[in-house]
Amino acid sequence: MSRSRLALIGSVLAAGALAVAGCTAAPPPAPAAPPAAAPSGAQQPGGHGEHGGHQGHESSAPALWAVQTGPLGVVTTDGAGHLMYRSDADSANPPTSNCTGECAQTWLPVLVTAGVKPQLLGVDPGAVGTITRPEGTTQLTLAGWPLYRDRDDPGGNPNAGRNGLDNTWFVITPTGDKAPAS
């Protein structure tokens, strides 16, 4: 391999390492091939709005990021660092949400405007889909599992959250699996 090619590869790797190490305020532009995990403290413009009813947490372009956490390994968050959850009360085949009414006030469905693709970082686009909820909104799915976030999660620094709550609610990995118990 030529010396100039080695220098180019070294420069690209060094730039990537600096970008990952220093990325705390905003994500890099959408890469052609996303890294395995995004930084956990990054903020995303255009993330979720207020924490109130369904309209408050709907976003025209939500984000799903693969993020390395200490206690849970690599998990899925939104662009503001809110942990994404799946519920064993739901179904992945066929994708079905059973969290409505009071449940959906605590476990906020991750909504998207129909036809809008989420911003992904380290999450396989082929694993992301949508379902129509009973009230007519469009909810994101990952590996068929409807996605939620805990209304009390302040975001910004993922931790163990409420993984395994009631043996029903689990932080979801980028592949749709349950995060391991912490």
Image (spheres, grey):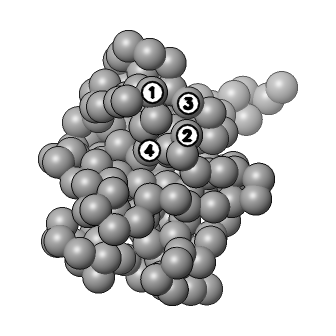
Q: Residue at x 51, y 86 (%)?
A: 136
> Is disc 2 in contact with disc 1, using a CB cutoff of under 8 Å?
yes
Name the image quarter holding residue 72: top left
- From the image, state whether disc 2 or disc 3 is nearer to you: 2
Residue bearing the label numbered 1 = 167
Mark 1 packing: few (<14 Cα in 10 Å), some, or many (20+)? few
Q: Amino acid at mark 4?
A: Tyr
Residues at marks 4 and 2 touching, judged by CB atoms closer than 8 Å: no
| Residue at x-position 23% and y-position 75% | 53
Q: Residues within 10 Å of mark 4 (few under 14, many from 20)?
A: many
| Left or right of residue 134: residue 177 | right
Using the image, determine if residue 60 lies above or below residue 174.
below
Amino acid type at circle 1 is Asn
Q: Position of residue 24 (x, y in %)?
A: 24, 44
**Where does the image place residue 7, in percent across and percent down from the top left?**
62, 31
Direction from residue 181 to residue 1 in the image, left or right: right
Instruction: Specify the quadrant that holds the N terminus.
Output: top right
Instruction: Looking at the image, tell me whether mark 2 or mark 1 is earlier in sequence order.
Output: 2
In the picture of the structure, the residue carrying the numbered disc 4 is 85
What is the secondary structure assignment of the residue under circle 1? loop
